[in-house]
Amino acid sequence: MNIDFRAAAADATVKRLGNVSGANLAGMGDSGLVAVPGAGRRFQFWQAMVLNVLIFACMLVVLATFPLSWMGVISRGSAMLISLVMLAVLLLLRTPQARILRAYLTSRPDGLLRAFDSLPRRSIGLEETRTYKKTKFVTEDAGVCLLDAERRRLLIEGCQYRYVIHAKDVALVEPVSGYALSGARVVCRFAGQELDMVLTAAGQGPLASLMHAFAPSEGASSLAGVLNQTLFGIDSTHFRQSVPPPIPTSGI
C-alpha cells in the first residue's frame, strides 16, 4: 500500500494545531496542511467518473458520425453539425463540474472557503510532481485556491486536504506543461516537511479549455504568474529562493 506523499506533513501540522479546522490552519502563521475528514475522496471519485463517462460518450458519438455518413444514414452536413455540438459540450463540461465542486467545498462549515469568502479564487487540481505526467483516473486532489496577496499566501480547500502556503516557505514556483496539462510546480515546506507538487489549472471556460488542450504551456505560464504575483508580488513565471531550515521546537 502506497503512503500518501502528504501524510507526514499533515501529521506534523495536526500535532501543532490539535485540529483540522480551516480557521486554525490559516492562523498558524506557517505553511501547513491537514487531511479533511469525510467523503471528499468519494466525491472526487464520482466527479471524475461522471466527467469521464460524458467525455467518452461524446467521443463515441463523434466517431459514430463517420460510418453513418458514409453509409448515407445521415448527411455530411448533419455529421459535421453533430461533431461541432459534441466539441462544444466537451469544452463546456469543466465549468459546471467546477461549480459543483465549489458548492460542495463551500458547504463545509469549518472550511477555508467560508472563512475567507471575499478572496479571489481559482479552481485547481493538485498532483505529486513525481507522478504528474502519469495518466490518473483520480488525481491526488481537486479543489479551490484562494489568492491572498495581502498576506502573501495561498489557501487551498481540497476534496481530501486543506492547505495554507506562505511565501516564506516556498522554495520554487515554475510552470510545467504536457499534453492537455497546464500547471505550476510548487516546492514548499509544510510543518518542517518539504513537499514537491504541481497545481494544475481546472474549471476553465470554453476558450481556456481550447488553450489548455492545444497550447498547455500558455496556461501553465499564466497559472505560475498568478501564483508568483500573489506570493511574491512579482510579474514572473519563475521564482526560486533559499528557504531557511525550520527552527527546532523545544521539547521535541
Image (tube, rainbow, N blue to C red):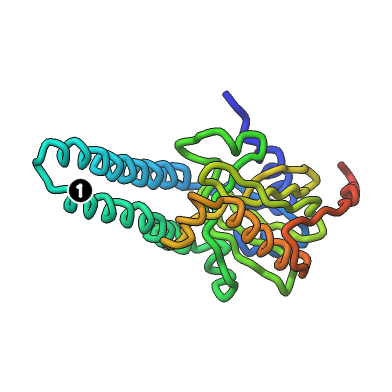
Q: In the rendered image, is residue 42 in sight?
A: yes
Locate residue 86, reporting x and y percent. Answer: 28, 51
Q: Identify which residue is drawn at 67% across, 69% down.
A: 148
| As drawn, 51 above or below 120 | above
Q: Pick whichever, 66 or 116, lies toward us.
A: 66
Q: In the rendered image, is residue 28 in sight?
A: no
- Is the residue marked by circle 1 packed among few (<14), some (14-19), or many (20+) residues within 10 Å? many
Q: Quadrant of the N terminus?
A: top right
Res. 206 image quadrant: bottom left
**Amino acid, disc 1:** Ala
Where is mark 1, residue-wise? 79
Locate residue 14, reporting x and y percent. Answer: 68, 48
Locate residue 221, reporting x and y percent. Answer: 65, 57
Q: Identify which residue is drawn at 58% across, 47% down.
A: 126
Q: Considering the numbered disc 1 on the image, is that residue within a helix, a strand or a loop?
A: helix
Q: Quadrant of the C terminus?
A: top right
Instruction: Please tell me how many numbered marks the rendered image carries.
Output: 1
Q: Identify which residue is drawn at 81% across, 51% down.
A: 171
| As drawn, 10 above or below 118 | above
Q: Pick whichever, 152 or 42, lies toward us.
A: 152
Res. 166 image quadrant: bottom right
Q: Is residue 81 left or right of residue 29?
A: left
Q: Is residue 148 left or right of residue 248?
A: left
